[in-house]
Every structure is written in structure tokens, then in C-alpha cells.
Image (spheres, rainbow, N blue to C red):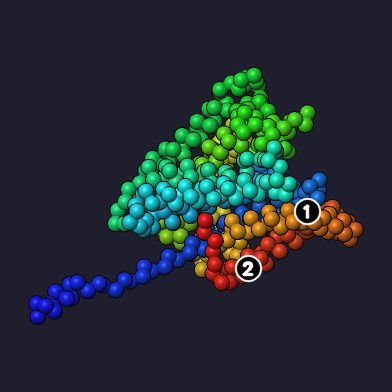
Amino acid sequence: MAAEILKFEKREQPKVAAPKAKRFEALDILRGLFIIGMLLANNAGDWSHIWPPFDHAEWHGFTMTDLVFPGFMVCVGISMTLSMSRRIGEGGKGEMAVHVVRRAVILIAIGLFLNLLPAFDFAHWRYPGVLQRIGLCYGLASGLVLLHSHIEGGRLVLHARPLAIWAAGLILGYAILLKFVPVPGYGLGDSFGPEGSWPAYIDRIIPGIQHIYQGGTNEAGQVVYDPEGLLSTFPAIFNILAGLLIGLLIQKQTPAQAVGSVALAGLMLVIAALAMDSQIPIIKKLWTSSFALLTSGLAMMILSGLMLVMDRMGHTKWAMPIRVFGTNAILAYVFAWLFSVFLDVTGLAGITTRWMHSVIVDPYAMSFLFALGVLVICWLFVLPFYLKKVFLKI
């Protein structure tokens, strides 16, 4: 009997697979909506004829298209609460830090590579970009999470209060810098302008005029700023932290129960942004503090509506076409970029738009329909991945 007991004690217990986490449906759809918005905005058939909702605000102001990128950043933050708070493995925070750095570097590297296409002009290689900003903000926000968290029961427990303090500090600090700190050579006379603002001033120094967006010009046609420049990346971290905090709020309840709380939080941020606008104007290309507040709040309000429909009311089947993009957002974005380059290099873009101009009288409708066609092609590319449940994870 003793030998049998000893043998029983040494026998390895069968490993029980942890139950697979259920996908946050509303988040997938929100992410999908923002990717759809990005693709429509990035692939106009005629850049001189774009319906206002599908174009960025010229400077001070806001359009539907201005929401898609910062709204996607909020989705990144919410996703982080779902992934980083799960079991982190034997390596603990060190292993997670390595994963964060690797993921951030890959995102930045992909963005830099896309900016080289198609000419591989290293002398005018644009360093900033959408994926670069996502990678930087994700990496820095993840660093704050690892700093303000502890491991309990094999899971990472995030500390909401210090993360909220960091979020508020980024917003206030950036607002104070732009509003009250004189820019060398410009003072405060153009502190929210395309040339005399701190973000534009830094862009021209780091990385330099030849390595920033060549469309970021002043009235004289001189390149003076980058909409994804270095300094304006820091307030963009707020959007991720806002997503983190709202994700923690949802985790404390359920998506169905948190509808009202998420909507209220979003409404409060929108009100704060509108109240700030007279002093800190809403400007996407500088990612001003009011812009960060407004876009985070609107993203939360849209998310609350999706949670109401999908989680509380149970209506989910209608969203399948959007979910295709939401579950493979980065893949869809990269493919759309490569496809756009292919159309330009082969001349198919010009051939197609000239033909469409000949059969569609309204140039604005033609421009939108071209972008819609690109969107459909991208959807068809991503669809097999969705059907086979293959979700790209960087």
C-alpha cells in the first residue's frame, strides 16, 4: 500500500487546458469600423474631390475621418487589458517586457518598410507614420503598465490610479507646453499653427525636413510638420491609456453591465474636450489635448452602443462583415497599403479612375466608389483568414 501511495504521489497530474477566453465582440466590431474608416480615407480615387466626412479637417476642426486613427488607439488600450492581465507565464514581467519590445519593434519596422515603397528613396525616407506611432505608444504605455502592476495568482493586476494620473499628466503637460511655452524663433504667436508650434518645431529637428511627411506644408509650400511626428506621439499615449482604463472598468463588470458606465465616461471626456477647445483647439495634425480627449470619448460612446446591441441585446450576426476586418486589423491595413502601391506602380489606379470618370458624372461619387472598391478587395483578401480562424498576432 505504501509503495502504491508513493507511486500515486509521483504521477504527473493531467494538464487541464484553460478555458479559451471569449472574444470581446463589441471591441472587434469597433476596431473593424475604424479600419474601414482608415481604408476609405487612404484610398480616394481623386484626392481633389473627397466628401467632407471622408477627409481630414484642414486644421482646426473635426471630421468623422479624424476619429479613426485615435479611436483605433483606444481599441489597442482595451485589448491590452484583455491580454496583459491574463496568465503571464513563468518568465513574469521580464518575459512580458521582452514580448512588448518585440511587438513594438515589429510594428515600427513594418511602418518604416511601407514608407520606403515603392521607390526606396532613403534620402527622403519618412520615419514617422501610423504603425510607428502605434508601436511607440503601445511600447510606452506597456512600460507604464508593467511599472504600475503586480502579479497575483499568476495574473497581472493593473493599478488604475497611477495609470489615470499618467493619462491626466500627459494631457495637461502637453496642453501647457503648447499654450504657454514659447517656441524658439516663433514665441507664442503661432503656438497651434502648422509652423510655429512645438510639434512642428521638433519635427524639423528630429528627424529633419527630408524625413517627415512631404505634404505637411505651410502656405508658402514649405514642409514644416508631420501629422505623426515625434512630440505629438506623447499625447497619443493618452488614447491608449484611456482604453486601458475603460477596459479595466469593463472587466470589473461584464460588457452587458458596463454599457452605462462606458457611455458616461465617454460623454465626460467629450464635454471636457469641447470646453477646452476655445483655449486648446481641437487639431488632429498636432494631436492636441482636446483632440485626444474628444476622440477617446467618442470611441467609448460608440463602444457603449455596440456593447448595448451585441452584449446586452444579443444581436451579433449582423456585424460579421465588419468583424472580418476587426479580427485581423493590422493584416488588412498592411495589405491595403501594398495593394495601393501595386495600383500606382502598375498604372492600374490611373486607368481605373479615368474609366470611372468617364461613366460617373459626379467626381466626389467616383472618388468614393474607387475607395469602396479597394475596401471590398481588401475584405475579400482577409475573409479566408477569418473563416479559417487565423488571426494575425504580432
Q: Quadrant of the N terminus?
A: bottom left
Residue at 66% x, 52% y is 38
> x, y percentage for residue 230?
58, 36
Say the numbered circle drawn on residue 345. Answer: 1
Q: Residue furthest right?
A: 358
Which one is in front, 340 or 29? 340
Mark 1 lies on a secondary structure that is helix
Relative to 56, say whether 310 is above or below.
below
The kind of residue on which mark 1 rests is Val
Neighbourhood count class around disc 2 (C-alpha, 10 Å): few under 14, some 14–19, many 20 upward: some
Judge from the rendering whether residue 284 lies leftward or rightward of residue 390; answer left or right.
right
Q: Is residue 60 visible?
A: no
**For the residues marked 1 and 2, what is the alpha-carbon distance in whole angstroms?**
25 Å
Judge from the rendering whether residue 140 lies leftward or rightward of residue 187; answer left or right.
left
> x, y percentage for residue 284?
63, 39
Which one is in front, 315 or 216? 216
Circles 1 and 2, Cβ within 8 Å, touching? The answer is: no
Judge from the rendering whether residue 39 lies leftward or rightward of residue 4; answer left or right.
right
Judge from the rendering whether residue 46 lies leftward or rightward of residue 247; answer left or right.
right
Residue at 51% x, 66% y is 313
Residue at 40% x, 51% y is 96
- What is the quadrant of residue 163 in the picture? top left
In this rendering, which labeled residue sits more in front, label 1 or label 2? 1
> Closer to the N terminus: mark 1 or mark 2?
1
Mark 2 lies on a secondary structure that is helix
> x, y percentage for residue 213?
69, 38
Say the numbered circle drawn on residue 383. Answer: 2
Residue at 59% x, 56% y is 330
